[in-house]
Image (cartoon, grey):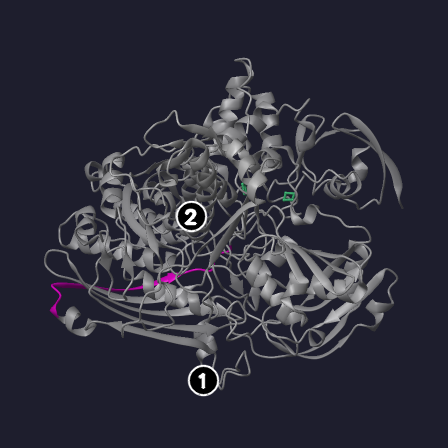
Amino acid sequence: MKEAPNVSGFDFSVIGKGLPRKDAWEKATGAAQYTDDLKLPRMLVGKIKRSPHAHARILSIDTKKAKALPGVKAVLVGSEAPNLYGIMPQTPTESALSIDKVRFVGEGVAAVAAVDEDTASEALELINVEYEPLPAYLTPEEALEDGAVPIHEDKKGNNIIYEGKQSFGDVDQALSRSAYVLEKNFYTQCVNHAFMEPHSALARFDEGERLTLWSSSQIPHYLHRTLSLVLGIPMQRIRVILPTIGGGFGGKGEVASNELCAAFLARRTGRPVKITFEREEVFFTNKGRHPMRMHIKVGVDENGILQAIDFDTLMDGGAYLGWGVVVMFYCAAMLHLPYKVPNVRFHGMRVYTNKPTCGAMRGLGGVQPRFALETMLDEIALKLDMSPYELKRKNAVESGHTTALNNYVRHSEYKKCLDNVVKRSGYLEKRGKLPFGKGIGLAGAHYSSGTSYTLYLAYKPHSSALIRVDTESGVSVYCGAADIGQGSDMVMGMIAAETLGVPYSDVQVYSGDTGITPFDLGTFSSRVTVACGHAVEEAALEINKKLFGVAAVSLGVQGEQLTSQNGKILSQFEQKKSMDFWEAVGKYISASGPLTATGHYTPPRRSASGKVQGGNIGHAPTYGFTAQVAEVEVDIETGEVRVMKVTESGDCGQAINPISVEGQVEGSIVMGMGQALFEEMVAEGDRVINPNLHEYRIPTIADMPEIDTEIVESYDPESPYGAKECGEGPIQPVIPAILNAIYDAIGVRFNELPVTPEKVLAALHERPAS
Amino acid sequence: MKQVIELIINGEPSEVIVRPNELLVDVIRDKIGLTGTKKGCGAGDCGACTVLMEGKPILSCLTLAISCQGKHIETIEGLAKDGTLHPLQQTFVKKGAIQCGYCTPGMILSAKALLRKTPDPDPEDIRYEMAGNLCRCTGYKKIIEAIIEAGQGAHEGGPERVRI
Ligand code: FES
Ligand code: FES
């Protein structure tokens, strides 16, 4: 690892430069190939028939007519693909198609492969499914009622998926001794990722039962494992390739039914099969943000120092397990930061309902409690006649903090974020002083930068990388990370270029292909820059070591005194003792053969020491921090809230590529604003009634606030080039900053999302005249 | 009943056989083989399938191919000329207005139509004209910056060529 800078402006040649992304060129010209753009000879089109019932037993499926339709090559039903799977392998609940029961409207019951789309659609119509409807439960409360039919039969007598409890310190005592305790209820809605590229998968079986699957996924490794399990063929005979991916945000972080059905149908027909979802199917197979009811108590002393958090939540899990238990314990862990909280109690219950499954979405586990807690701290500060900024600053964590849960925060510039954002936005001058209808609000947050544990018990490194350097192809970096649009390929290429001292343009990154790239867990938990970045840096250092051996002899300088910079290998002390990088590469290869090296990364494990309660979930090697100030205008006539400006200060460590960091932050802010003000998957009757991008409205360019972001000076000395996450932290404070601003504007605290014009008007109506 | 129609795509005439219910987006992608045009919703809600017909932006997922007989259609593949990117492509790349890139072709074509009407747009013009093109990745800020810079470049002799 290169030495951490002790002065600002550490002199990097590639890191920290806002370079344009290599992949942007082909995306701008339309040349980039996404999965649905791929075509293979004799390729068939697959389609999935979906259930019109929210909860029903399947009595029979008649596929005879569909099979007889000319052009139909195969029909698949659930019982022919019976192996269960799940992203949490210990407790699989899902199947490629439902087997004997459907659990939500839109669940797949049969799949066909045909010569073209029209034939496939016609075949779906010809499949006759006989159902015996069962009572459907759209809310956790209904699903928990006495006598409710269990949605999963293995659950003896109830619909509770999991109940999680954690208790650290003495919460009751701390609350009873607190000078002030605030107790409130909150509700958050179901939100969809709404990535622009619908899921698509293309499967091909070769001679000897070898499967190649191209798919729009962010977890090539877990997909690889699941294909093996569900198809019953060894992993060695499967290769997963990610073409260009059109966004994921967590929604492509689980295996989707199109991937499995395409593989089954390809095996059965001996022809390639592609299944691309319609937008409606993206909503049905949603693994979006959990609706959560939260009951929270927060206690502080007379100076506003946090004493305890008591947190109780009921999570609407939808029909299957998905990432659910992980989300629950992430949520529990989120209570312990970004403030010092000595006493914390968590109780959570995740319940099955007859709706699409909820899972991982950008900032998972954090967005809901952060909305609640940051608005509560705002309220507490004002009750204590204190600025919310002052209260948050007093409680903010600093580097070296260990939480009650035993999370270790090795590096934090959270206070700097708060100071910086308050200063740049003029928060202190404006809060409480703007005219009625205008308001300003502050919120802060953290997010885990990586995860310390795998989803299944494994001790192997979480990320690995291989670098090959030769005079013909230049520098080739192979890593398993999935670039889903966030730009991880660029980050890996920049880390390799910086370490080897060559221009970024000399480096090619090959990623997301289980056939050629070494092992990586995938893109989730904001883990890629730190984990895969470490692996790439280690491999590049190993290449340097080999080249320094060659240069040492040739230059007559000790290997340890050499460094690589600007395409040269040179003495750190006597710059003229230098050798061209490529000359050294040529010499090494002539003398010793191919020049390759590997690197890998395993996050530090946290020892349980009697403290861990709940599967070790939520521990991370390091944490990113962010603070935001939102300014809003509330239209008193229409109830519409307009976010005018968001100012953000982020601690993402050293930004590898500042343009990409800004892009992550800006995207997070606008996505969070959508959840705050209008996004919601609405369930009515027995189904989600707005499974399209017309009625499920996401922010457009016309909704966009002015956004002003700044990366605070920061460097985590244990991270690759000091970097930390920036893709999930910045969505955390958006909602509470906006809601605190709404309070500042009209004196109303909203506890339920989204804050629609109807809710605002109703609240304005009820507000006592002041 | 299938019918032969002629489409002039990016200046090149092509004859294609289409069914009456076939959509332009599918013809462009599957029959002509220009997959740069994207399909995000198939229902007119996202703008990813935007192409220019006779210079005007249309949603190719809502347009019947058969209604386009003899029309000039421009897709994202038609913008770069002689290995040089169109100014909008250049500024989108340079400004970081592209993340996953799925919205990009539609976004750039809508922006091209906007610049033709309003060569030097301010952010308000862009907000008004481009609200039909959804992007979930970028938060739009860099897209606005890229369009403004491309507009300025157009009468300052073009933005600098991007090398990557
Ligand atoms: S695909 Fe045409 S508007 Fe979405
Ligand atoms: S860049 Fe991904 S949707 Fe716009």
Please give the range of residues in magenta. A177-192
Instruction: Between label 2 and label 1, give the one nearer the viewer.
Output: 2
Q: Nearer the viewer, residue A112 or A437?
A: A112
Is the C-beta of the residue carrying label 2 under 8 Å from the nearest atom of ligand 2?
no
Chain letter of the residue beneath label 2 in the structure image: A
Sooner in the amino-acid sequence: mark 2 or mark 1: 1
The image shows residue A140 at horizontal and vertical percentages of: 45, 72
Q: Is residue B20 magenta?
A: no
Q: Which residue is mark 2?
A: A727
Where disc 2 sits, the SS reads loop
Is residue A20 visible in this depiction of the protein?
no
Question: Which mark, by number, is residue A146?
Answer: 1
Residue type at tag 2: Gly
Crowd class of label 2 (few under 14; some 14 to 19; many from 20; radius 10 Å): many
Residue type at tag 1: Asp
Side (left or right) of A703 relative to A303: right
Q: Are marks 2 and 1 on the same chain?
A: yes
Q: Nearer the viewer, residue A151 or A730?
A: A730
The image shows residue B132 at horizontal and vertical percentages of: 57, 38
Crowd class of label 1 (few under 14; some 14 to 19; many from 20; radius 10 Å): few
Chain letter of the residue beneath label 1 in the structure image: A
Q: Nearer the viewer, residue A337 or A185?
A: A337
Q: Residue at x 35, y 60 (%)?
A: A604
